[in-house]
Amino acid sequence: MPRPAKPRHVDFTPTALFFKPAGIPLRQLEVATIGLAEIEALRLKDVEGLDQAECAQQMRISRPTFQRILTAARQKVSMALVSGNAIRVEVSPLEPEIHNTTDGYCPHCDAPGHRHRRCNQETT
């Protein structure tokens, strides 16, 4: 029995959750789904320009786990771009718990700036 996944800490929520090639109807496109943790890994490494150790520390996961998340995200985005597919950002109910530190406070652990996605509890 595998060990439960550690929560990934995400400091960013994208405003656009869907991207598609211009001029092609959505019904004709395949859709690649990318998780919120994968978007955060891309943001930290490629946009912020942090090294792998700093990225893993910010997400509060190990460096090998960060590398696996980043590799999966880059592969999905690259395949979608090369194949002309749409990309959907989605938080799956099967994804490990996400701690979003951009809003509210967590009613479960009383820490400021957290939101638990696993139990779908939104903070105010």
Image (cartoon, rainbow, N blue to C red):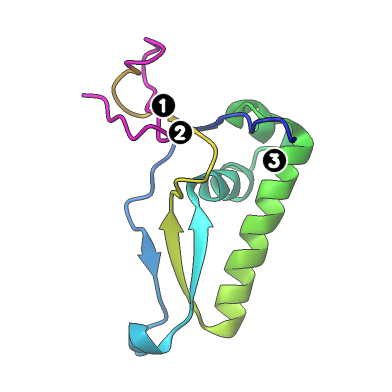
97 lies above or below 92: above
| Quadrant containing the C terminus in the rendered view | top left
Amino acid carrying mark 1 in the image: Thr
Tally of marks: 3
Q: Nearer the viewer, residue 10 or 91?
A: 91
Mark 2 — residue? 11
Q: Residue furthest top?
A: 110
Residue ID at (67%, 57%): 72
Q: Is residue 15 left or right of residue 59?
A: left
Q: Which residues are magenta?
A: 107-124
Say which residue label 1 marks.
101
- Which quadrant is the N terminus positioned in? top right
Q: Secondary structure at mark 1?
A: loop
Residue type, mark 2 in image: Asp
Measured from the top left, where is residue 83 in percent x and y?
58, 83
Residue at the (37%, 10%) spot, across then down: 110
Which residue lies at the image location 50% right of the left edge and 33% below the top edge?
A: 97
Alpha carbon of mark 2 to alpha carbon of mark 1: how far? 5 Å
Dot 3 falls on a residue whose secondary structure is helix
- Disc nearer the start of the sequence (2/3): 2
Asked if residue 120 lies in the magenta stretch, the reply is yes
Pick the residue in front: 46 or 78: 78
Find the residue positioned furthest to the right: 64
The three-letter code of the residue at mark 3 reads: Phe
Residue at position x 61%, y 66% in the image: 76
Q: Is residue 110 above or below residue 33?
A: above
Say which quarter of the image contains residue 52: top right
Local crowd size for mark 1, using a 10 Å CA cut-off: few (<14), some (14–19), many (≥20): some
Could you say which is closer to the camera, residue 20 or residue 122? 122
Q: Could you say where residue 116 lies in the image, as x and y percent from the top left?
A: 40, 29
Q: Nearer the viewer, residue 94 or 90?
A: 94
